[in-house]
């Protein structure tokens, strides 16, 4: 048994396996949320990249939810004693399609836990490896590394990292309005109780942010959705994204993309209403 006094590195190698099925209704709901025309997703239709996040939802009992809307610390993830938790980035290998109707098994393993001292205090980075298999296959259809960062509470006088200007004049551009309804629907679809995405009083008064925070996975999904809109026939082999700066409502933000001269690499990035880079990503096509 682990306990709160154990070194966090003792969680490395800890693993859990969960099962699900790729039902059509969540995918049809995300189709609507991303403002695509209604589509019937027949059994056997391939899921777009990143839409596996609609499955394996965190089904924590209501009595196990902490004050920030996440599950209380401990359980599978190490019990990091820092209050702010953010999704820092992810890396993916899409090895074979996940299709509507597939039986799914996801094995998650704590790959690494590291502690660093940053400008605003202690930081703890947790890297989780997820492998998703379909219909009893031995080889994973999808391998995902998920980077989580925990940090101390915001303090008066904390200096934000200097922002980075996003590249202008991208060949592909789409403006997104992150209103309360979009953020609520994505929270609901991913069963994400984290209050920073829908509870304005909590996010501004307790966590000290200027507005609701747009989900990092939603921005990543919108970047991949931009690629699908521009290159509908493309098959994505790998994808990686890094969250650079939080995006807050109510201002519109923009997703951008550009196919590189090699015809295989797609640069994708998001920027806020002030033109600052908020997410940096790269996709590789088959």
Image (tube, rainbow, N blue to C red):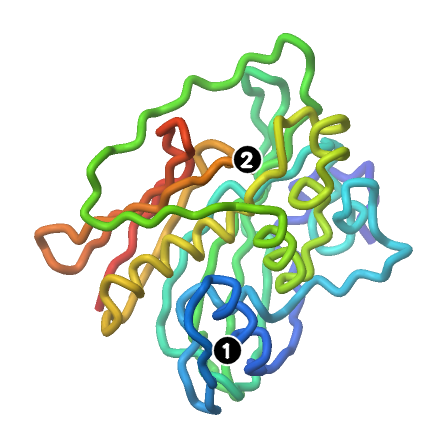
The reply to whether the C-beta atoms of the residues labelled 1 and 2 are less than 8 Å apart is: no
SS assignment at label 1? strand
Nearer to me, 73 or 170: 170
Q: Quadrant of residue 162?
A: top left
| Residue at (55, 20) in percent of width and height | 118
Residue 47, compared with residue 285, is above or below; it is below
Q: Residues within 10 Å of mark 2 (few under 14, many from 20)?
A: many
SS assignment at label 2? loop
Residue placed under numbered mark 1 in the picture: 133
Q: Quadrant of residue 98?
A: bottom left
| Residue at (77, 54) in percent of width and height | 75
Q: Residues within 10 Å of mark 1 (few under 14, many from 20)?
A: many
| Residue at (24, 50) in percent of width and height | 172
Disc 1 to disc 2, how far (Cα)?
35 Å
Horizontal side, residue 170 vs residue 99: left or right? left
On the rendered image, what quadrant is the C terminus found in?
bottom left
């Amino acid at each position: 048994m682990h306990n709160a006094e154990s070194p966090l590195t003792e969680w490395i190698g800890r693993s859990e396996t969960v099962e699900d099925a790729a039902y059509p209704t969540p995918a049809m709901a995300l189709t609507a949320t991303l403002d695509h025309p209604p589509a019937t997703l027949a059994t056997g239709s391939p899921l777009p990249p990143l839409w596996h996040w609609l499955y394996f939802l965190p089904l924590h009992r209501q009595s196990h939810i902490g004050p920030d809307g996440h599950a209380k610390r401990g359980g599978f993830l190490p019990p990091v004693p820092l209050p702010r938790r953010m999704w820092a980035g992810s890396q993916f290998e899409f090895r074979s399609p996940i299709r509507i109707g597939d039986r799914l098994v996801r094995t998650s393993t704590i790959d690494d836990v590291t502690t660093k001292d940053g400008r605003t205090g202690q930081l703890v980075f947790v890297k989780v490896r997820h492998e998703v298999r379909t219909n009893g296959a031995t080889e994973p259809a999808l391998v995902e590394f998920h980077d989580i960062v925990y940090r101390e509470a915001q303090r008066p006088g904390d200096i934000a990292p200097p922002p980075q200007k996003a590249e202008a004049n991208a060949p592909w551009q789409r403006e997104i309005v992150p209103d309360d309804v979009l953020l609520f629907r994505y929270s609901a679809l991913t069963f994400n109780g984290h209050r920073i995405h829908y509870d304005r009083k909590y996010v501004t008064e307790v966590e000290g942010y200027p507005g609701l925070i747009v989900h990092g996975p939603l921005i990543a999904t919108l970047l991949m959705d931009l690629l699908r809109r521009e290159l509908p026939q493309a098959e994505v082999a790998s994808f990686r994204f890094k969250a650079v700066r939080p995006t807050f409502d109510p201002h519109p933000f923009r997703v951008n993309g550009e196919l590189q001269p090699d015809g295989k690499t797609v640069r994708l990035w998001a920027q806020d209403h002030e033109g600052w880079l908020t997410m940096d990503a790269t996709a590789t096509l088959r």
